[in-house]
Amino acid sequence: MPEIDDATMQALEAAAYRRLRDHLRARTDVQNIDLMNLAGFCRNCLSRWMAEAAAEAGVPLGKEEAKTLVYGMPYDDWKALHQAEATDAQKAAFTEAFKTHG
């Protein structure tokens, strides 16, 4: 593995995050519950992690502001445009996947 200095590593990680964020913005057909069921995280998790990182760095960034950064628009707008009601199968998979988390 090559040696990578901290600044370069941060830049690479930031670029990878932006690519993930942009990919999720483009894949509006993929519902958050599907992400949770398959990967254990979703767009809301990313926004929460962003807000937590901001708080740790002393940067004032609220929950809704962080969601806007992740979704590319206010969360309520994204939900109205792209979020479908979860199916019974999705809900059951979610319950099964997270029954040990409580």
Image (cartoon, rainbow, N blue to C red):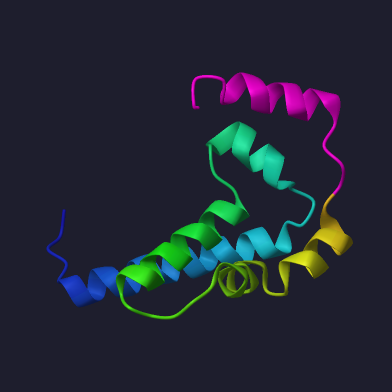
Residue under the point 64% across and 73% down? 68
Eyeballing the image, is 28 above or below 86? below
Identify the residue at image location x=53%, y=73%.
62
Q: Report if residue 4 lies within the magenta region.
A: no
- The spot of residue 23 in percent (x, y) is 62, 61
Q: Residue drawn at (54%, 44%), measured in percent from left and top?
A: 41
Taking the spot 82% from the left edge, 37% from the top edge, the residue there is: 86
Magenta region: which residues? 84-102
Quarter occupied by residue 16:
bottom left
Horizontal relation, residue 20 to residue 23: left or right: left
Between 31 and 6, the one lying in front of the other is 31
The image quadrant of residue 66 is bottom right
Judging depth in this view, the residue of 40 and 75 nearest the camera is 75
Is residue 56 shown left or right of residue 90?
A: left
Horizontal side, residue 14 vs residue 96: left or right: left
How far across and down, in percent of the image, does residue 100 sit?
49, 20
Residue 8 point in image, percent of width and height: 24, 74
Residue 69 or residue 60, whichever sits in front = 60
Q: Is residue 36 above or below residue 9?
A: above
The image shows a total of numbered marks equal to 0
Residue 39, x across and y down, in percent = 54, 37
Q: Judge from the rendering whether residue 84 lies leftward or rightward of residue 44; answer left or right.
A: right
Is residue 99 highlighted in magenta?
yes
